[in-house]
Amino acid sequence: MPLDLEHGRDLTLALLPELLLTAWAAALLLYAAWRHRDSSAQRRAGWLSLFGIAASAGAVLWLWIGGARLEGPATSVAVDAFRWAVDLIILVGAALTVLLSVHYLDREGIRVPEYHPLVLFAAVGMMLLAGGADLFVLFLGLELMSVSVYVLAGINRRNPASAEAALKYFLLGAFASAFLLYGIALTYGATGTTKLSRIGAQISALGIESHPMLAAGLALLFVGFGFKVAAVPFHMWTPDVYDGAPTPVTAFMAASVKAAAFAALVRLLLEAFAALQPGWDGVVWGLAAITMVVGNLIALAQRAVKRMLAYSSIAHAGYLLTALVSGSLAGAAAFLFYLLFYTLMTVGAFAVLIAKGRSGERDVTSDDLSGLAESHPLLALTMTVCMLSLLGFPGTAGFIGKWYILTSATGAGYAGLAVVLVLTTVVSAGYYLPIVMAMYMKPRLHEMAHADVGLPRVVRGMLVALVVALLFYGIWPNQLLTLAREGSHAFLPPHVTPVAVPFSPN
Amino acid sequence: MSALAGSAADAVGLTVLLPFLGFLVNGALAFVGPRRTRLISIVGVGSVAAAFGVAVLVFLAVLGAHPDEPYVRSFWTWMPAGDLAVRAALQVDQLSVVMLLVVTGVGALIHLFSVGYMGEDPGYARYFAYLNLFIAFMVVLVLGASFPVLFIGWEGVGLCSYLLIGFWFTDREKAAAGLKAFLVNRIGDAGFLVGMFLLFKHLGTLEFVAVAERAPRLLTPGGGPATAIALLLFLGCAGKSAQIPLYTWLPDAMAGPTPVSALIHAATMVTAGVFLVARAGVLFALAPAASAAVAAVGAVTALFAATIGLKQWDIKKVLAYSTVSQLGYMFVGVGSGAYAAGIFHLVTHSFFKALLFLGAGSVIHALHRAYHHTHRRADAQDMRNMGGLATCLPVTSRVMWVATLAIAGIPPLAGFFSKDEILAAAFGRGAESPFWYGVWLLGAAAALLTAFYMTRLMLYTFHGPNRTGTPERPHIRESPRVMTLPLVALAALTVAGGLLNLPHVGTLHHWLEPVTRAAAELVAEPRPPLGTELALMALAVLIAATGIWLARTKLRPELLVPADRSKPETGWQKLLLEKYRVDEFYDAVLVRPVVWLSRVVLWKALDAGAIDAAGVNGSAVVARSLGWLGSRLQSGQVGTYVLIFVVGALAVLGALTG
């Protein structure tokens, strides 16, 4: 299916998943406006939003299987397998979030039907991040996503922690956006274009690989995206915000927000700045290393499970950065594979926390999970599989993902970073395994310790599916690996012929 | 491309999948419906029977094509690591098909028997789940196309064996028996693993086809590497197949349910070592010293275990030592380069030994029910509590006599031909070195003892007066049809099994020829002249008859008294009954020092003192303090956060522009 984006019809087709989801979200928002503060409306909006997600996912699949590809000059939207793969990962994350939220909002008495349209809008923003081939589209997607998530983080207005989280996230987010925008400006100044593929072409055509303005632009872009993916030292907001936000929103932020921002960063680095890889690999190296070390070490010191998971998600940003350091296709493939299962295991862990935390997830410590296996075997099993997968234990999908990240780094000669990854993974066993131990080997604190733990049937089904996926693809990852490799082929050079419009930066 | 592509052999994966699905279903039923006996039986037996059906189709395909090259059906690459790519691949050739038929066929019969034997057990679903899982792993073991895949099956059956030995895990002694089997096997497996590493180092591959092709080119015959690899692999085999010095776990493994003993500890799993030597025949052919060691260990084990079998009172213990002894024969066969003969004995042994175990199970079942009726606690496995059962258990008694004559080596039953061929092969190599005459002599002596202890078992169990107890006697009844049917089927196989490979007609021999050819090119298969062979056969019959006659005349079943009234043995009889006190010897020389070393030196001093305190806890303390410092920075103040953010931004800017 060749698509010429100069034509309106083809452009519509190329943006079909985003358009469908936007329309659906807008309609749902209207519904929510009429049925305000009504918990049955909240539930209905939740189930309805799943249809929008399904329709959008269907469109993505249709385009992917139909072999949609770009014909004609590069435009602002990418049409490639990488986009479809990330889109699907995002939609899965959004669907899981909605599934978790419906029951959660009910339980916590948060009667806001507009919650679900906001999730959908955030997902649209993420998909634009995954598919944007122009710095402005990326920025647009980033802001659409961020504004929606700011609101989601503070949706429980009666809870001061939630409000504080939203405000902090907003303040720091705005600050980071400014950096990003300045980076875009400088990049435009150096190359005369904001289209990613043209930036790449211009860099080699003009021979400005070491131009300071370009370097400064890239550095500021790094800072902007580093904030969104919660890479150290731009991570300071993460624990507070993750901790304060409603837990399903935390899961959404830790999984999907991060995934989308990472996808945009990958596209940026591999498509626009591939020529500068010998320069930026050092920055990625440093960010990855310090992120892994700091994330894992501080996670070790946490007592509350929710906060521990927040730091663990920082550590995982480090692992994902490791996949990027070589700028190779193997790295992009490993990145895609890991991203999918990172989403699944993160959501799974938070789902267990939600089931346990009727009286407030923030206070659940690993001791509170003692003896959970006895009364709630499925929950304990899910948590165990998620912990082992996050740890990268063989037999789980997390292991295969980490393995491919490692081989992509060592294969390109970044053995030092691989060593950091392995050592910090050892450290991470120090906070993942105590949870498993508490659930299976310690007795319950008291007879009624888990009496209030409960989860609806649909979430139970979701957890079973998660566990099966994590274990199944830990043993039989080949098909997904092939897909991931196909996705990474979006960055096969050369992408477009250089445009020979001379532009001399002043 | 193999001639088998596109044939029924493509469906070979089903033979793994079906029992595995059975395991999943029964495993789920163990939780949700442990009393749905009917469904559990149908799934448990049906999945294995269906796998047997598929195996027959695969066999017919191989029979039709009789390909020279193995057909490797590759499913996916599990993990490429450097030069090593572990493919999940199954290999269909003449050898693996024979094993597949035995495993699924005998397995299906034993599953059927279990329906009756385990019907009353509360853990019925769990039992069938384990048994199905065992079959799945065993099929992986025999079909695996590379050492790693075989090893997965190897470890998997070990796990199932451990689970099933300790099936009644609430009994401390039985749980300990499971643990012992597991630990002793670890010693052998360590050897196997190191052998694999060496193999990969020297040949750069672990797939059977490539190993068979490269080994003759890259390894010097009789050289150090070849000998080391073969010996290390054999260490693994000695563990799995219970050979000296690692045999001690098998008799204890009889703690598991009797059908498990029949399936795992007689017919299939324990023969895996013999199978591996045959599979890696090329490697052993390149290492004559290792092959001689295999034969020597086999011969000594055969005789040694047979002597212990002479004085055991527990009916299952007699059969257990008999199994160890018979496995010794198989190793004599494969060790002397007669791979087909070794496999032949493996097949016939799986028939008659499964039959013996199931027969013993039938006896135990009957006695157990009788004691249950009168609420008396007595050992239902002790032969001193049996006697005269032939009248109450006519079917069991008859089929067990068939098996006894077969294992003793009376023609034309299966055991005669297979045992004879092994001994003839060892004798045939006597021309090279008198060492092989010694091997033959040990084997012949063991054959005499085999005939003796098996006749003893039959006399004490089924003949003479009954010693079970007067109140119990009327309650001893023949087992139900579902149990006797597999017995009769196995008896038929025991009678007809010899036809598979008649001397000098050699169907199985010819059938396995494409598999054994690579090894046979290196070391010619030993074969004595026809006249010698006929003389040996006559001698073998004489030996067997003497053994039976000796037992018949020397033993007096009518003088026996029930177990609780017997006097303890003295002298050499005591030594035999106590199995030469090898377990005690191992315990004193190996187990206790090792436990002491690990408890006092390794655990308390080194682990708890040095590593835990200084290393693990030390570094944990350092890591935790660093983490604590980090979380101190997490003040909650947005101003602090912005400050750190800006420092970071400046660092990135500096790194890129500097």
Image: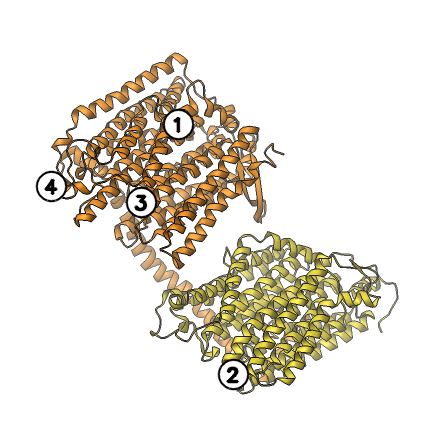
Residue B297 can be seen in this image:
no
Give amino acid for label 4: Arg
Give the quarter of the figure containing the N terminus of chain A: bottom right
Q: Are the residues flagged by discs 4 and 1 from a single subunit?
A: yes
Q: In which chain is the residue bearing label 3?
A: B
Residue extending farthest to the right is A501
Q: CA distance from mark 3 to mark 4?
A: 29 Å
Q: Colour of chain B?
A: orange
Give amino acid for label 1: Gly
- State how the image is colored: by chain
Residue that label 2 marks: A109
Report the side of A137 relative to A431 (left or right): right
Q: In which chain is the residue bearing label 1?
A: B
Q: Are marks 4 and 1 in contact (CB under 8 Å)?
A: no
Q: CA distance from mark 2 to mark 4?
A: 77 Å
Q: Colour of chain A?
A: yellow
Q: In which chain is the residue bearing label 2?
A: A
Residue that label 3 marks: B117
